[in-house]
Image: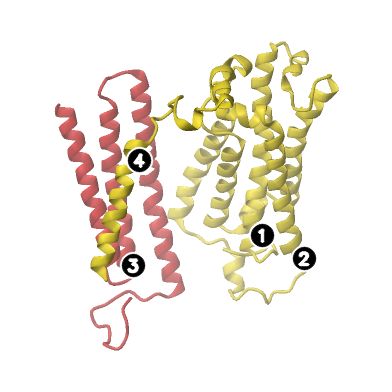
Amino acid sequence: MKIIGFIAVCITGWLLLSAINDFPDFGDPHSPANGYRLSQYYITDTFTDTSVPNMVTAVLADYRGYDTLFETVVIFTAGIAIIGILRRYGSSDKSVGRSKAFIEEPRKDLLIHTTCRLLIPIIQLFALYVIAHGHHSPGGGFQGGAIFGASFILLALAHNLKTAEKRMPERRILTLAGVGIFIYAGFGLACLILGNNFLDYSILHKLLPITPIEARSHSMLGVEIGVAFTVTAIMFSIYSNLVSSSRMKEGL
Amino acid sequence: MILNIICITLVSLGILFFIGGALGILRFPDYYTRMHAAGKGDTMSILLIFGGIALYQMHEVTVANALVAGKILFIAAFIMLTSPTSTHALMRAGYEEGIRPWTRKTKKGQSDS
């Protein structure tokens, strides 16, 4: 049996390795996936349209802004649904098999606490960088928000849920999640009020002393910030609900 | 040429340590010794491999290459911080849950896995 497994692994590995040659090069504009006229338009015209070098973000936040807006709404809805289904109020203590001291006292572990103290600021700084640099390099609101939410989860893992809850109470979670979508939709509405289509950012140059092309670039940043708010809040909300059997009191 | 040789040596050494870690996870008798192999072997091997890659980036000494090499070294530094800590956390969690360390005197009937 072991020999058959070994042969299967070898054959699969050989197949995978032999397929490497057929991959298109990294960033190859003539790869089959980029063969359509639509892709060619994005490749040639994104920078002149929006002055954003990262065309993925341009497609995501500008050309297909509706899609991303409702993606954010989907995340918001998922978070609200999890809170709505799982969250239980009131105080019955029978749900957890662990002792009270274990729950109440934050665990003292010098090594883990020191590492977290070192790492959490760096993680959060990196998350902000990923958000703010989303239209220049790989990154954006979803990724940065996920990293930011993960830093709160790390805090909850290293100390306990209460410590993280102090930094990020439930009320604040819900507010931030809503504010994120309002920021995104607000950009769209501002475009609408100024007389353009919904989420057509170029009209926003009237508000600031910039050109219409720059307005599209900067609006993408604003939109990403909105997305990041929602993703951060919902990430931590899902974690804290699932881990504490929805009482927000104890858990890991 | 010399740079290439150094890079190849570093990466090969890293892979050797990786194999050691993988063998340790497979072959060691209990939880604690397995985590020991995983924590030490992986950290060392990732340091070596990333050191080799970072050095390879410096083929031509330009600012852009130095930036890439620096980022790789940053990743190595973060892994050096976090990998032992996570191993420590897992060990402690296992100890608090009451997993007994393996000894040679395990009775015949009990499985030691």
**What colour scheme has been applied to the protein in the rendered image?**
by chain
- Disc 1 target residue: A241
Mark nearer the viewer, 1 or 3: 1
Q: Which chain is red?
A: B
Q: Which mark is residue A167?
A: none
Q: Secondary structure at mark 2?
A: loop
* Mark 4 closeness class: few <14, some 14–19, many ≥20 residues within 10 Å: many
- Please tell me if label 2 and label 1 are on a single chain: yes
Amino acid found under the numbered disc labelled 4: Ala
Residue A244 showing in the rendered view:
yes
Question: Which residue corresponds to the image point at 15% horizontal and 26% vertical from the top-left?
Answer: B1
Q: Which chain is yellow?
A: A
- Disc 2 target residue: A89
Tell me the CA gap for discs 4 and 1: 33 Å
- Disc 4 target residue: B76
* Mark 1 closeness class: few <14, some 14–19, many ≥20 residues within 10 Å: many
Chain of the residue under label 4:
B
Chain of the residue under label 1:
A
- Please tell me if label 4 and label 1 are on a single chain: no
Between disc 2 and disc 1, whose residue precedes? 2
Residue A4 vertical placement versus B38 (above, below):
below
Tell me the CA gap for discs 4 and 2: 44 Å
Amino acid found under the numbered disc labelled 1: Asn
Q: Which corner quadrant holds the C terminus of chain A? A: bottom right
Q: Are marks 3 and 4 in contact (CB under 8 Å)?
A: no
Amino acid found under the numbered disc labelled 2: Tyr
Q: Are marks 4 and 2 in contact (CB under 8 Å)?
A: no
Q: Which mark is residue B32?
A: 3
Q: How many marks?
A: 4
Q: Position of residue A200 (x, y in %)?
A: 74, 23
